[in-house]
Image (spheres, rainbow, N blue to C red):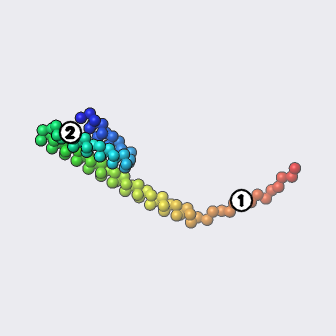
Amino acid sequence: MQTLDREEEALRRAVGRNDFTGAALSARRYTNLVESGLRDLAPADAEARVRQARSLLEWARRNLRAARTRISQKLVQLQGISRYHAAIPMPPAPIHTWKIDA
């Protein structure tokens, strides 16, 4: 149980950091832990555990999907700004018109 709780927290932290790879690995470990723990539970408790796991994984999926959308929109915005800056003519390098005599 303790390991399951730690993995649940690890998944929540990964989702909070928008760590897609970490969240995928944590979700895989979490589902394996849930699956292995179901054998030791009564049917009603097993059903409750599955509902809880499904709820957590659905929460993670929704949040990561929203994060991916936000990141994608930000990328499009930055690409637009980049094109705008590329279209601005750069002033020529300054030419110094003074001379130092020694």
Q: Which mark is residue 8?
A: none
Mark 1 crowdedness (10 Å alpha carbons): few <14, some 14-19, many ≥20? few
Query: Where is residue 74 drawn, in percent x and y?
Result: 43, 56
* 70 is higher (above) or lower (below) than 52: below
Q: Quadrant of residue 32?
A: top left
Q: Could you say whether the residue bearing mark 1 is in a helix, strand or loop? A: loop
* Residue at the spot of label 1: 94
- Foreground residue among 79 and 96: 79
In the figure, residue 30 lies in which quadrant?
top left
Question: What numbered label is drawn on residue 37?
Answer: 2
Task: Measuring from the top left, give residue 70's x and y in whole percent.
Answer: 39, 55
Describe the element under mark 2 as helix, strand or loop.
helix
Q: Callout 2, which amino acid?
A: Gly
Q: Position of residue 78 (x, y in %)?
A: 48, 58
**Residue at position x 80%, y 56% in the image:** 98
Q: Is residue 18 left or right of residue 43?
A: right
Which amino acid type is shown beneath numbered disc 1? Answer: Pro
Q: Earlier in the sequence, mark 2 or mark 1?
A: 2
| Nearer the observer, 99 or 57 | 57
The residue that appears at 15% across and 38% down in the rendered structure is: 41
**24 sits to left or right of 50:** right
In this picture, residue 55 sits left or right of residue 13: left
